[in-house]
Image: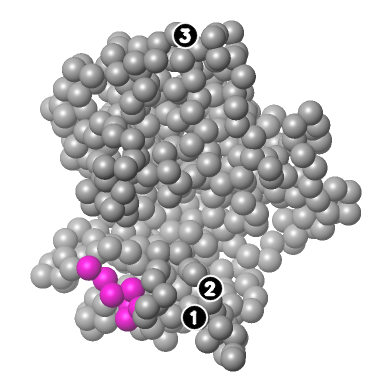
Amino acid sequence: MNDLLFDKEHIWHPYSSFINPDPAYKVISCDKVRLKLEDGAELIDGMSSWWAAIHGYNVPELNKSVIDQSAKMSHVMFGGLTHDPAISLCRKIIEITPEGLDKVFLCDSGSVAVEVTMKMALQYWFSKGIKDKNKFLTIRSGYHGDTFNAMSVCDPDTGMHQMYKGVLPENYFADSPECGYYDEWDCNKIKSFKDIIEKENHKIAAVILEPIVQGAGGMKFYHPKYLNEVRKLCDRFGILLIFDEIATGFGRTGELWGCDHSKVTPDIMCIGKALTGGYMTLAATIASGKVALGISEGKAPIFMHGPTFMANPLACSVANKSIDLLLNSNWRSKVKNIEEQLKNELLPIREMFSDKVKDVRVLGAIGVVELRKKVDVAKAQKYLTGMGIWLRPFGNLLYTMPPYIIGSADLSRITEGMYKLIENDEY
């Protein structure tokens, strides 16, 4: 049995069925922005490996950090022990995240980081002897991960987890923000959120949002002032505010953090994906002193969470180097250049194919074409890989989030592929 047949019959890939699964393309190596396949074909990566590989692939500095650390210590439990890579990383995280967030809990994936934020919020109120505040408020079209509690704050109707409705904890969902990033701010657009928080604040432990960009729930970009109003309402009603920066962090939206567009600081923030430059799985939840002390000085002072691979030294080491690479590069101008090129090459698609295209959106190093019908992923990927491009559409969205190092010619090949896919109805 050859490898691909074995893969098809025995390996369960994400978001797939064993009956007629989407084809899996076998990658044998990666370098810069290219994925080399077993048959010799090379694909320009327009996905940054689900938005994580911001520096591209086979990065000498990142390779070296893993090799050097592996010679010292690949892993050690974090309970009762600590090590330099974790200490150095937590220093960096505190330095670059919004002021006031200075208590770091290292996790092993983005979904786990969301679970940790939600547990922290609940335990904050439990420690104060207030157990009625055990619900969360979020907005529709959001996505926060596939683990159990994270699913409970993903869109319950249009998201990926409708089948679990009635089983998951029931939380509150305000309308998705209708005031787009580039629109003139309309304060009436937060009415749905305001109505719920005014009515149900005594039950709400925290608000959890993806700042500015809603990722896998719909790739929507909303107005920065929305977050300012959310912060005011949370302060007014004594509710914690959580920002899920797993997809929006590390420069993807044009600012280092999505919340920087609004200059708003949450009470708890979670980061992941690009934290290690796509090299290893690692995430972090960063809390304010208010939250940490509120838990530690209260009736439930011990935070009962401890992933086995928490603060893995290899992951911490490569995360340290990835952050250094980002901050010491001209990442802001790179992302701005990508944004301008995506605007120039994608925005015209909206008028050219108005019968097929519902909307086109660009922000930072994110380009989204929202189609009027659902994409046949297998068909679309067969066409795009034939053009030497790697994209992974979902729902009715065709989008790109390329590595920051991508050159203009390669980016044009991606946008040309998106154009031709639509033009030729290859989806």
- Residue at the (40%, 11%) spot, across then down: 130
Badge 1 amino acid? Lys
> Which sits earlier in the primary sequence, circle 3 or circle 1?
1
Badge count:
3
Residue bounds of the magenta highlight = 374-380
Q: Which of the labelled discs sits on residue 11, or is there none?
A: 2
Can you say whether 306 is above or below 2 in the image?
A: above
Nearer to us in this view, 100 or 236? 236
Tell me if residue 220 can be seen: no
Badge 2 amino acid? Ile
Question: Magenta segment: does it hold 196?
Answer: no
Residue under numbered circle 3: 128
> Which sits earlier in the primary sequence, circle 3 or circle 2?
2
Q: Which of the labelled discs sits on residue 8, or is there none?
A: 1
Tell me if residue 397 can be seen: yes
For label 1, the SS is helix
- Residue at the (36%, 53%) spot, across then down: 216
Q: Left or right? Give the position of 301 relative to 197.
A: right
